[in-house]
Structures are given as C-alpha cells and as structure tokens.
Image (cartoon, helix red, strand yellow):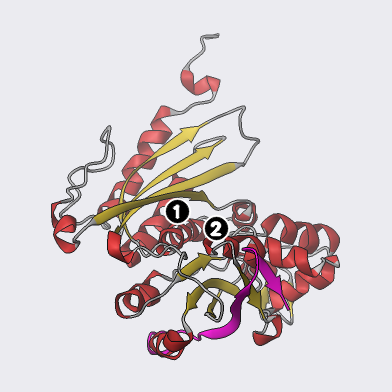
C-alpha cells in the first residue's frame, strides 16, 4: 500500500487548476482589445495605455475592489454561479462610476475549498459577459484552492477594477449645496448587499426555500434573490459628458443612510422622501417577515434605489430627460438641505 503524501492527496489539485484555466481562457480573451498585451497565465497583466491617454487631457486612474458577499450562498443553493460573476463586475463598475470613471481592466480572485473546473468556468463566464458589456478587459486573476480554510462547498469571489476619468471631470460631491435635487435610478433587487438579513428572514424565519413561490414576487424566492446587480455605466456615462452632475452614490452596504454621506459636504444633509418611490415586493417581504425596523432596512439594503445623482435644480429636468432617453425611469426622491453631512428619511 502506497502511503506517500502528494499535494493532491493533501487537498490541492494542480491539474484541476490547469483545467480551470483552459476552460476560461476563451471567455477572457473575448473581452480583450488591442491594448491588452498578455493573455491569461502571465505573471503580470500588461495593458498599453497609449490609446487611452490620447482620449484624455489629464487622465486619472481610479481603482476599486469589492466582493459579492453572502449572495454567494444563494448561488450555491441554486447551483448557479454565472450570475454572481456578472454581479461582481457590475458592482465594481458602478463604484468607480461614482467618480465619473469608466472601466479599463478587471482582475478577479476566486477562493474555494475544493476546485471544480465547471464552477470556475461558470463564475468567469459571468464576469467576462459583464466585462464585454462594459468595454472592460478581463486581464487576469487568481484561483486559490484552500482546504481547511473554507468549509465544504464554501467559496469567495473578489474583483479589482481599474478605470480612468479626466481630472477636470472627476465627480467629487464637494459642490453639493442646499436646494440641489436628488435623482434615483431603480435597482433590480438586493444587488449584492443585505443577503445575510434576507437569508435570516426568508429562509430561517419564514421557512422559504429557493424554489418557493410567493405571489408578490412573481417568481421563486431564489430567482428574486439572484437577480443580477444592475450596471449603471451605460446610461450614466453619456449623461456625465453632457451635464454637470455634482455627486453620485452607489447604494450598496450601508444603504441610503451610510452611502450618501460619503459624497456630502459637512454642512448639508440629503433628505429623502421615502413615499416618492414604490419599494419593491422583495424588500417589503423581508421587512414584514422579519419585523425589521425601518432604519435597519434602509441601512442594510438599497430599498429599490440602486444609485443616486445630485444635480442642481436647473439641470434636473435635462438630466432626467437624458435618462429617460436612455431607457431609465428617473425618480425625484429628495433634496439637499442644511445639515451636518447625514442622510435623513422622511
């Protein structure tokens, strides 16, 4: 009997890693443009900035890193992994959009307990789909098989985006003042935040499964929870070129309560009229099923508002018109008032 120990018997399958790489190369390559100088598997990812620099007078790189949180657990319960790849890219694109930037390159980090090439393929295929839609090149990543670190079936997903914006067009929020108007764009669901609360209420307290139907949702609980995080780059970047947008906040973890103050000067508050938009059924179901306090819902979820813009009253109608032309349904959901850099819900 052979009692020798190999890396594979210890828990790391290098061949599975190579098979995963083979499966994802085509999807990643489909996102590449002439600026990408290396393929997957290189020690570093090379990106020629020459063409990009010609488009900008004073180009500034913008970087952001984020994950998908416990939405990954819902994907595992559903046995579907491509959608969370889309979520990851769109989340990161929206984050740098808040400063007026568009994405250039994307890197991913996938950590698993046991490496399954078909799972990695699904995750990266989703990322590549979203990257291609956003004109972002998926230039590399890392897949780590970590037995003993993650429990059976557990995994994590992280993305790093690099984008660019002209220095004169960086959106900072510093010029936001009393009387400015807040415009919101609808979310497609929870996006990538609030899933720990949602799982606790829907699965543990209410007893739903991912295949359970609820009449208000119009679909299964699992499908409602797995709805892809919206990408706002395509409707908003053209608006940034035409109009003066003073501030943009991506409504992620922390909701309206914690995210909007990140762009506010210290002498004003963002006042939201919560009756000015219809909170989608999924959020109402979570709030009612868990008797969740209002402030907690608005701090842990987006409550149907995925991103907000702050504009002057003079620009508000034009910005809303541009958004409608782009197929959006802009909502006038609040205004800026004197304050101390906080969010107020009314």
Q: Which residue is mark 2?
A: 80
Magenta highlight range:
323-346
Q: Position of residue 201 (x, y in %)?
A: 80, 62
- Say above or below: 219 vs 322: above
Query: Is residue 30 or residue 175 the one in the foreground?
Result: 175
Q: Earlier in the sequence, mark 1 or mark 2?
A: 2
Marks counted in the figure total 2
Q: Which mark is residue 122?
A: 1
Q: Is residue 86 visible?
A: yes
Secondary structure type for disc 1: helix
Question: Residue 189: image x %, image y %?
Answer: 60, 71
Q: Is residue 331 magenta?
A: yes
Task: Identify the disc placed on residue 12.
Answer: none
Crowd rating for badge 1 (residues with CA inside 10 Å; few <14, some 14–19, many 20+): some
Name which residue lies at 57% across and 35% down. 113
Q: Viewed as shown, does residue 239 lie left or right of 110? A: left
Point out the image quarter for the N terminus: top right
> Height in image: 45 above or below 82?
above
At label 2, counting other C-alpha atoms closer than 10 Å, the crowd grade (few under 14, some 14-19, many 20 or more) is some
Between residues 288 and 251, which one lies in front from this camera angle?
251
Q: Quadrant of residue 234?
A: bottom left
Q: Position of residue 103 (x, y in %)?
A: 33, 59
Residue 64 lies in the magenta-colored region? no
- Look at the picture and state if 101 lies above or below 117: below
**Mark 2 and mark 1 in contact (Cβ < 8 Å)?**
yes
Taking the image as drawn, is residue 116 in sight?
no
Task: Examine the rendered structure and indicate whether residue 153 appears above or below residue 78.
Answer: above
Secondary structure found at label 2: loop
| Quarter of the image with the C terminus in it | bottom right
Q: Is residue 207 left or right of residue 16?
A: right
Does residue 175 appear to the left or right of 294 in the view shown?
left
Report the Cα–Cα distance between label 1 and label 2. 8 Å
């Amino acid at each position: 009997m052979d009692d020798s120990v190999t890396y594979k018997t210890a828990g790391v399958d290098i061949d599975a890693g190579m098979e995963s790489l083979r499966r994802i190369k085509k999807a990643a390559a489909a996102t590449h443009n002439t600026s990408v100088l290396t393929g997957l598997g290189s020690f570093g990812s090379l990106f020629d900035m020459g063409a990009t620099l010609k488009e900008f007078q004073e180009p500034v790189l913008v970087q952001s890193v984020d994950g998908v949180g416990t939405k990954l657990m819902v994907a595992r319960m559903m046995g579907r992994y491509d959608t969370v790849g889309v979520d990851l890219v769109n989340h990161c694109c929206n984050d740098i959009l808040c400063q007026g930037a568009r994405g250039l390159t994307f890197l991913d980090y996938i950590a698993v307990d046991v490496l399954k090439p078909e799972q990695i393929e699904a995750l990266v295929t989703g990322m590549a789909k979203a990257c291609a839609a956003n004109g972002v090149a998926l230039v590399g990543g890392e897949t780590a098989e970590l037995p003993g670190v993650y429990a059976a079936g557990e995994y994590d997903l992280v993305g790093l985006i690099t984008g660019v914006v002209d220095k004169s067009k960086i959106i900072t929020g510093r010029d936001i003042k009393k009387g400015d108007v807040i415009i919101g764009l609808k979310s497609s669901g929870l996006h990538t935040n609030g899933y720990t609360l949602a799982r606790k209420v829907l699965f543990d307290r209410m007893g739903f499964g991912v295949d359970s139907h609820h009449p208000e949702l119009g679909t299964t609980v699992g499908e409602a929870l797995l709805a892809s995080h919206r990408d706002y780059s395509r409707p908003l970047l053209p608006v940034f070129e035409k109009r003066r947008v003073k501030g943009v906040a991506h409504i992620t973890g922390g909701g309206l309560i914690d995210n909007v103050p990140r762009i506010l000067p210290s002498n004003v508050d963002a006042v939201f009229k919560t009756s000015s938009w219809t909170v989608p059924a999924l959020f109402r179901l979570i709030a009612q099923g868990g008797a969740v306090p209002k402030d907690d819902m608005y701090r842990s979820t987006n409550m149907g508002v995925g991103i907000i813009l702050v504009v002057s009253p003079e620009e508000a109608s034009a910005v809303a018109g541009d958004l409608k032309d782009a197929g959006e349904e802009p909502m006038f959901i609040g205004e800026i008032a004197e304050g101390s850099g906080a969010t107020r819900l009314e």
